Amino acid sequence: MERHYGPVHDSIELRSAFGGAAMDKRMASLRDHIQVVRKNWTNDNSYDELVKKVQQFHKPENLTQEVALQLQRLLGGYRDYADVDLQRPIPMPSEQYPALELYCGKEGHDYIFRLMGRALREEEKTDDLMLALTTLLEFVTIDLYNLRLSQFGDPRFNNFQGVVYRGMSVNRRVIAEYRAVLAEPELAKRQFAVPLSLFSASTDEQIMLEFSKQNQGVEDRDTDDVKMHWEIHVHGVEPALLQAYQQRYPDSVVTTICALPVARVSRYGEKEVLLRGSFFHLIDMRSETLEGQDVVRLILLMINANRDHTSEQSSNLNEKARQRKTFSRIVAASKFEACAGIAGRFSEADASGYRRLQLAELEELKEVDDMEFEARLDLSAMRSPEVAVWLGGSLFKSHPTHYAEQRRSWQDALDREDWMKLLEILNRDYDWRQNDWFSVGRLYEDKQSNEGRGMSLLHKLASGTPEIDPNEEAFTAWAELVDKAADPAVWKSIHCHEMNEQTAEDIARSRDDADLQARFKPKFVHNVNHETLMVLQKQLHSTMQEHAGKFVWQRNSWALLPSLILSSSTSTRSGCPRSASCSRCLGLNYGYQCPICTV
């Protein structure tokens, strides 16, 4: 797939097509059409009319069979933000993301990309094109928002922060344009946008480099092209500023869907993070040589925060206009704070300049917006924390199609004790999600077939050394899985329903396997008595059901998180007196937070 290595319609590339006032006019038109789409979304009749217009635009002769089927699925029924109940006549299917699946497929991606190119480059825009494109983008926005909600407890979905990579080949004149941006004397203007952006990056730099190698021998590539690699530092807004904003404007919905992991939706995996609505700040450019090829690396920063939600309409009117301006200052202050920390690696003068810009934005927030806050000023060092995540859905349909298929392959490989296949599936996932696979149970077609949860990989590994020649690859794969399972971040306190509620340690002990028993011994970092755990578990399950909502919650469709696991999780904060119920320790953005964790 070339989603990690290919062209991007950014505001630099588009200068040759239109720029300045023309570009502003085109973007204003896009925003106008988005508002039209959102106003038509809330009423069943107008929604139906909108969808019919979009269906008429996507002419069958212009579509491949795959794209036609995906669009038919997407435009059938209703798709809404999961936290807004519009009382539709047909319930929305939970945990399904047809717009994202359309984008994440090669043919769907190419089709959407062509529409974006037409919308941005054609001299004479047409209302039907703009309406069809903005409707597709709204579908994608809804899927991103709902995917984030469905992964409650995982901070990388709640607020992704980290470094992602993307590569491309560009003409040398485009490189000169980027250098002109970096040479801009006003630091605040060293930025560019990606209009209508939907493009893929990866948390794994090696994936970008592999795609880069694949493009080395392309015969029709312009000899004047240069390889360009983007190193994108993604940060959320300064927590203290966000808290002050939400206290001032509780009705304003702030989302973190500008950067969202989507590998469990994409059939290609590749540790993908989808970037949407991106505004980049260019911090540095440097030339490198990789395997004899000249490469230009851009060091970029983007803030993962926006106000894209169906409730955020008429952003230029009255109270919403004030909210938008305040939020813009918060984003700017956060951006300059993170820029200062990263720029210190390249230019101390730039770092000092960014700190001055940040202080100016903070001063305006206090004086103009009358906000009170105490920022920690360490945003550039922040990354999404490591936490254990409970994968509660027990039905295939309670997960994205691609991930459900992965789970099916996992179950089949586990039944066959195909250690090499298990290791392959494990290694394809994000680094921070690989530990989850050791504990996942079986998925079922329906609630009636949900009988017995089967053995997890952890319990299967504890059942003893397989009768395989130690020189075979299968044995090497088994040994590697055992080593990975011994990681302290893998939950060891889970009981196996098929083995008389035994833990992996219990199973190893029953087989007199001292080595596996020692490796799989739970490490309890929070000693809490059983009665207290049961009280906390009841409170936790009640909170999960309350916040999951009726859109995704079905009785017997979810395996709820046992609080015993939280008491053995090394990912909770040491020193927290209520880590088993503290929302910060659990990686949640609601509920109780103890004093230690709010400092």
Image: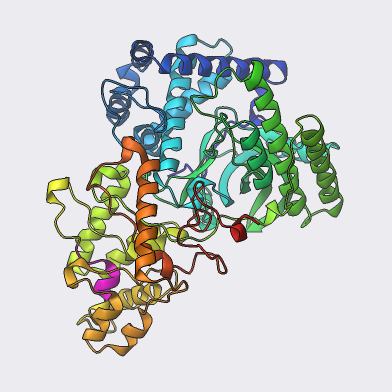
Which residue is rendered at x = 22% and y = 57% of the image? 442
Give percent across and percent down for residue 14.
Answer: 64, 26
Give percent across and percent down for residue 399.
Answer: 31, 45
Left or right: where does residue 384 sit relative to residue 301? left
Give percent across and percent down for residue 560.
Answer: 31, 54
Question: Which region of the structure is painted magenta?
Answer: 454-461
Which residue is rendered at x = 43% and y = 18% of the image? 132
The reply to whether residue 343 is visible in this rendering is: yes
Say which quadrant the N terminus sits in.
top left
Q: Determine the image quadrant of residue 329.
A: top right
Q: Determine the image quadrant of residue 320.
A: top right
Left or right: where does residue 405 sit relative to residue 564? left
Q: Determine the image quadrant of residue 241.
A: top right
- Magenta run includes residue 17: no
Q: How many marks?
A: 0
Q: Nearer the viewer, residue 414 or 56?
A: 414
Q: Nearer the viewer, residue 429 or 83?
A: 83
Say which quadrant the C terminus sits in.
bottom right
Examine the residues drawn in magenta and state their main secondary structure: helix
Q: Is residue 562 above or below residue 272?
A: below
Give percent across and percent down for residue 543.
Answer: 40, 47
Q: Is residue 161 above or below residue 547?
A: below
Q: Nearer the viewer, residue 221 or 584?
A: 584
- Give the colouring mode of the picture: rainbow
